[in-house]
Image: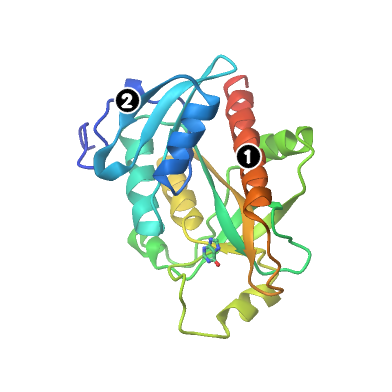
Amino acid sequence: MANYPTPHINASPADFGKTVLMPGDPLRAKFIAETYLDSPVLVNNVRGIQGYTGTYNGVRVSVMASGMGMPSMGIYSYELYNIFGVENIMRIGSAGSLQEDVHVRDLVFGMAASTNSNYARQFGIPGTIAPVADYTMLRTAVAAAEAHGARYHVGNILSSDTFYDDDAGANEKWRRMGVMCIEMEAAALYLNAAKAGKRALALLTISDHLVTGEATTAEERQTSFTQMMEVALDTAVRLEQM
Ligand code: HPA
């Protein structure tokens, strides 16, 4: 096992809580830390991938950015699980909806993360492995979402390597298989968790609709992100108390 600090995280295992919330955007990590955590301390800033640890309702919680895409999520989640001793990682991000009944601002829990990525190839599985969320984290987070009165869906999501895809028919094929939305990081997170024997979950808010073009105001978008962050923090507290 590699030693810390790593080329990507200039910290030690004691700097992180048991649960790390991971938005893609470093500025969102900073916002969550400054808005919700008591006594937040900046524990990483390599490449501007800000990571903070503080307390929420008395529980030590960390929040660190993943960057965009599976290679980036792959690096940070690998190091957090295998080098920094983190047990639970919860991605919190945005996604584009593929289903008419999955509306802008709804929450989506990725029970499974289908993917067009080759990330799993490294594990040499003699077949196709299904990247799945940790069930304990999933049911804990769903209970938190219900306590917050959130509108939510649970099911299959797509982790895509492309935001701009040359295949104009691809989204429709995923939609027909019931895949709820597209994002770009969960499958790598779930596979790293499986390999490390740790827990992972992706919680998304729908920021845009890829089928109906349904739109939202910046203010409404912020409100739904706020709800997602509060559900995620509540989940971290519930996991600690188990
Ligand atoms: N594709 C991938 N990731 C996304 C999207 C999308 O349409 N919307 C928000 N995150």
Residue nearer the viewer, 56 or 77: 56
Judged by depth in the image, the label closer to the viewer, 2 or 1, is 1
Closest to the observer: 208 or 153?
208
Residue identified by numbered label 2: 13
Residue 226 badge: 1
Q: Tell me where residue 220 appears, x and y as whole percent.
A: 68, 50
Q: Does the beta carbon at disc 1 come under 8 Å from ligand 1?
A: no
Q: Is residue 60 above or below residue 165?
A: above
Q: What's the CA distance linking mark 2 and mark 1? A: 28 Å
Residue shown at 63%/41% (left/top)? 228
237 on left or right of 10: right
Check the image and report above or below for 133 versus 162: above
Dot 2, crowdedness within 10 Å: few (<14), some or many (≥20)? some
Looking at the image, is mark 2 or mark 1 earlier in the sequence?
A: 2
The residue that appears at 26% across and 45% down in the rendered structure is: 47
Q: Residue furthest top?
A: 58
The amino acid at mark 1 is Thr
User: What residue is at 65 percent from the left and 48 percent from the top?
Assistant: 219
Nearer to us in this view, 27 or 187: 27
Q: Quadrant of the N terminus?
A: top left
Residue at position x 50%, y 61% in the image:
129
- Tell me if I can see residue 19 in this picture: no
Disc 2 element:
helix
Indicate the secondary structure of the residue bearing disc 1.
Answer: helix
Is residue 196 visible in this depiction of the protein? yes
Give the image quadrant in which the ligand numbered 1 is located: bottom right
Residue 2 horizontal/vertical position (percent): 21, 37
Location of the C terminus by quadrant is top right
**Amino acid type assigned to the residue bearing label 2 in the image:** Pro
- In this rendering, the answer to whether 204 lies above or below 122 is above
